[in-house]
């Protein structure tokens, strides 16, 4: 078997692996409600860079007697590879937008709060807020006996994050005697 055929088989094998990797990425992004970060973009770019590298190797070691066919193959594989990359980046952007805290989103989507709570904790200093300020920001607490104590309020966040979503997540905020928030925790039932 010639080097040209071996290189082409390796390229086609990597193209199949590439597609599988991106379908796994899509599944993971949807399941974890992942958002844009340096790590997520790096993980998305690495297979695409490897795809371009494998194509360059293939171009270098393939007989060039049919340049038009090689160019078309290069363009098709690159466009399909880029389409999968672009789709994943758009999906990350959508989840990034959906995980941005706003009082309106918090109040209107009880099940989606689980994705808003990280942004809430990063953007709003809950500790030191009065009970009235917390209620203004987050609305009335959830009526539940879960984690309920005399000096706290509990907010239902939705089904726990992750691939297997069995339990629920809750935000528990404790107050001192003067109704100022002392601490808060995310809990799972």
Image: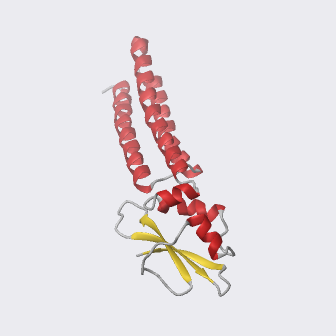
Q: Position of residue 35 (x, y in %)?
A: 52, 51
Image quadrant where residue 119 sits: bottom right
Image quadrant where residue 41 sits: top right
Q: Where is residue 10 in the image (x, y as percent from the top left)?
A: 36, 34
At a point 53% along the width and 78% down the height, the residue shown is 153
At a point 37% along the width and 70% down the height, the residue shown is 167
At a point 38% along the width and 37% down the height, the residue shown is 14
Assign the N terminus to one quadrant of the image. top left
Q: Judge whether residue 45 can be spotted in this image.
A: yes
In the rendered image, the vertical position of residue 21 relative to residue 154, given as above or below: above
116 or 64, which lies in front? 116
Assign the C terminus to one quadrant of the image. bottom left
Describe the colour scheme in one phrase: secondary structure
Q: Judge whether residue 115 can be spotted in this image.
A: no
Left or right: residue 151 versus residue 31 is right
Q: Position of residue 123 (x, y in %)?
A: 65, 61
In the rendered image, the vertical position of residue 114 relative to residue 30, given as above or below: below
6 or 13, which lies in front? 13
In the rendered image, the vertical position of residue 106 relative to residue 48, given as above or below: below
185 or 11, which lies in front? 185
Left or right: residue 147 versus residue 176 is left
Q: Where is residue 3 in the image (x, y as percent from the top left)?
A: 37, 27
**Number of callouts:** 0
At a point 45% along the width and 32% down the height, the residue shown is 83
């Amino acid at each position: 078997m010639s080097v040209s055929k071996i290189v082409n088989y390796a390229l086609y094998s990597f193209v199949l692996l590439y597609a599988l990797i991106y379908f796994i990425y899509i599944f993971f992004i949807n399941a974890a409600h992942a958002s844009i970060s340096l790590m997520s973009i790096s993980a998305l770019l690495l297979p695409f860079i490897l795809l371009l590298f494998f194509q360059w190797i293939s171009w270098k070691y393939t007989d060039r007697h049919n340049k038009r066919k090689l160019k078309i193959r290069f363009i098709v594989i690159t466009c399909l590879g880029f389409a999968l990359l672009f789709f994943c980046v758009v999906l990350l952007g959508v989840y990034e937008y959906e995980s941005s805290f706003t009082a309106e989103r918090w109040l209107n989507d009880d099940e989606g709060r689980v994705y808003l709570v990280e942004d809430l904790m990063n953007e709003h200093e809950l500790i030191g807020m009065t009970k009235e300020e917390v209620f203004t920001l987050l609305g009335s607490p959830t009526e539940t006996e879960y984690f309920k104590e005399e000096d706290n309020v509990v907010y239902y966040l939705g089904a726990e994050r992750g691939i297997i979503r069995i339990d629920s997540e809750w935000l528990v905020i404790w107050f001192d005697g003067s109704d100022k928030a002392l601490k808060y925790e995310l809990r799972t039932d």
